[in-house]
Image (tube, grey):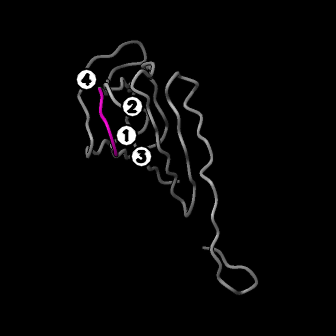
């Protein structure tokens, strides 16, 4: 909803695409509004593994559909893993190395970060 010349109005927009670092089978959509960043990963059943990486921000993830394996570790190697599935919440502190492997079906994960 927006304000236009003192009158409120509805505004509709398509979600912009979010680059998933060009890993096969990974797609994303993002939306930034009101100081909150949302993006949704849609991961194909045959998606390539998403390698170890980190972000400088804190994130909250919600598994909307599907599941797989989340890995922890250092920039050099995976050191631990946990299975995730539909309905799970996953939190990431800043600069935490992690990697992903999708399960046997399409997975959707919604991420949120404060701006």
Residues at discs 3 and 4 in contact (Cβ within 8 Å): no
Q: Which mark is residue 110?
A: 3
* Residue 38 percent coordinates (x, y): 49, 51
Which structural element holds mark 1? Answer: loop
Comparing marks 2 and 3, which lies closer to the viewer? 3
SS majority, magenta? strand
Q: CA distance from mark 1 to mark 2?
A: 6 Å
Q: Which residue is mark 2?
A: 96
Q: Which residue is mark 1?
A: 93
Which structural element holds mark 2? Answer: loop
Whichever of callouts 3 and 4 sits on the residue coming sooner in the sequence is 4
Residue 113 drawn above or below residue 96 = below
- Disc 4: CA contacts within 10 A as few (<14), some (14-19) or many (>=20): some
Q: Which residue is mark 4?
A: 81
Whichever of callouts 4 and 2 sits on the residue coming sooner in the sequence is 4
Q: Residue at x 43, y 46 (%)?
A: 111
Comparing marks 4 and 1, which lies closer to the viewer? 4
* Residue 91 percent coordinates (x, y): 33, 42
Q: Is residue 92 magenta?
A: no
Q: Residue at x 42, y 21 (%)?
A: 46
Comparing marks 3 and 4, which lies closer to the viewer? 3
Residue 83 drawn above or below residue 8 = above
Looking at the rendering, the stretch of residues picked out in magenta corresponds to 64-68
Which structural element holds mark 3? Answer: strand
Whichever of callouts 4 and 1 sits on the residue coming sooner in the sequence is 4
Residues at discs 1 and 2 in contact (Cβ within 8 Å): yes
* Residue 108 percent coordinates (x, y): 40, 40
Q: CA distance from mark 4 to mark 2?
A: 14 Å
Comparing marks 3 and 1, which lies closer to the viewer? 3
Nearest the camera: 114 or 51?
51
Q: Quadrant of residue 59?
A: top left
């Amino acid at each position: 909803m927006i304000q236009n010349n003192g009158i409120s109005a509805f505004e509709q927009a398509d979600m912009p695409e979010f680059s998933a670092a060009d890993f096969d089978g990974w797609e994303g959509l993002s939306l930034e509004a009101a100081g909150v960043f949302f993006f949704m990963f849609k991961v194909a059943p045959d998606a390539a593994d998403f390698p170890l990486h980190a972000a400088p921000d804190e994130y909250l993830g919600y598994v909307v559909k599907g599941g797989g394996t989340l890995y922890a570790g250092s920039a050099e190697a995976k050191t631990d893993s946990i299975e995730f599935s539909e309905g799970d919440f996953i939190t990431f502190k800043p600069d935490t190395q992690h990697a992903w492997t999708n399960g046997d079906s399409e997975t959707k994960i919604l991420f949120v970060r404060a701006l």
